[in-house]
Amino acid sequence: MCRFALAILIPCLLASTAIRAGETFLDERWTLEAFTDALGGGPGTGPAALARGPVDVLCGDAAGNLFLAGNQFIDIVTPEGQRRHLAGTGEPGLRDGPAHQAAFRMGIGSYYGLYDLACTPGGELFVADSGNARVRRVFQGEDGWRVETWAGGGKRHLAANASARPTDVALPGTMALAALPDGTLLIGTAQGYLRVSPDGERIQHGASWPDSLALPGKASVRLNLVSGDADAAGQAYFLSRGPDVVVAVAPSGAVRHLAGIVRAQPPKPHHIGDGPPREVFLDATVSLAADPTGRALYVCGGDEYDVRRIPTDGVTHTATLMQNGRWYRATEHPNRSRGGAVFRPDREGRLQPEGRLNVLLVAPLLGRDHEGTLYGKLNHWSGRSQYREDRGLLPTRVFRIRREEP
């Protein structure tokens, strides 16, 4: 729901938070910049900040290209800042071949209608084509950009340790993707993950999810995956909504429960807060982005109105960089205001209802580029909230959220 109706608060100028690790504190500073989907309207191609077009998810390659998916199109934004359609006709369907003639059914039939993409450093793009229950590959061939089916479309279900041709295997509509640096693709499903070789010749059953992730009273684990990513060391991460947890897949293939309490719902805890990753309650999560260094993940929690930093060591406390899930302490619920009544958090993340209006209403995180810069989206109904005190009104719905070194 966060992608369609909910919101998170992201500080316009910077956020600085202390992350507890024994006696060590780490400050992170962020700044926002306009990126694409012009508020005033514009063509679908041209300079990214002046171009118009919805974005539901994005990722980037090592050359500086960004790949954006929305409305059954995949766009590219080049390192020079030019946006154009790369693949898809805009109409749902199933067609491989030249990219401009290809057809997808992204987000159709998936959990909460969410999209997922995975970029390799070398410029390949993998698409979770949920409506067709396939993974599609977008790549640059000798005669231009092309689309092909990389996995799915078959009838075989893999048992533990089994393998097959990727197109012989049946895939679910709800899946998440993580591309490893060597070109291996991990496909996360409700029960576990599958591993596709870099040459696309074999798909293998990787591992089932840990039994500890089963909801109370349930005999088996079933995750509703909404997002995936991987870091430069080859560790992959998958985010589930209901139960709201993060699962990590090590380069060895081993899986572990990284973050989020597994609990029956409702009721929800009234106080959410931060703490050791497996002891925090994540609420209605929608998207995840990995720091390429492998130090942390950034998770968007829809019903918390926040972006949370989750250290990958499993011990260091989580920290809320943007809002803190305590919107009920504000004078007015930020999602209800539909305007400028949003407030700057203090250094500890608490809202200051009498503070200056210098935050944006953004929903959700869309992904990251190859260097780890995050991107967020402003919902169409909250245009009056995109105000920065030092710059005034910013002109795009999609923003670059750039981390500054301490």
Image (cartoon, grey):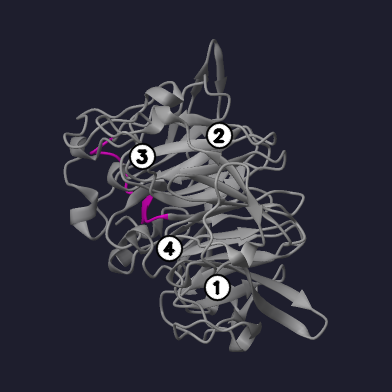
Query: How far across and down, in percent of the image, does residue 182 sit?
Result: 77, 50
Task: Check if mark 2's residue and mark 4's residue have beta carbons within 8 Å.
Answer: no
10 Å crowding of disc 3: few (<14), some (14-19), many (20+): many
The residues tagged by marks 3 and 2 sit, at their Cα atoms, a distance apart of: 25 Å
Residue 132 in the image: above or below residue 110: below
Of discs 3 and 2, which sits in the foreground?
3
Q: Which residue carries the number 1 mark?
A: 49
Q: Amino acid at mark 3?
A: Asp
10 Å crowding of disc 2: few (<14), some (14-19), many (20+): some
Q: Identify the element where label 1 is drawn.
A: helix
The residues tagged by marks 2 and 1 sit, at their Cα atoms, a distance apart of: 26 Å
Q: Amino acid at mark 2?
A: Glu
Task: Out of 1 and 42, give the one closest to the viewer.
Answer: 1
Of discs 3 and 4, which sits in the foreground?
4
Q: Which residue carries the number 4 mark?
A: 173
Q: Amino acid at mark 1?
A: Ala
Residue 57 in the image: above or below residue 272: below
**Residue 355 seen in the current view:** yes
Task: Check if mark 2's residue and mark 1's residue have beta carbons within 8 Å.
Answer: no
Q: Amino acid at mark 4?
A: Gly
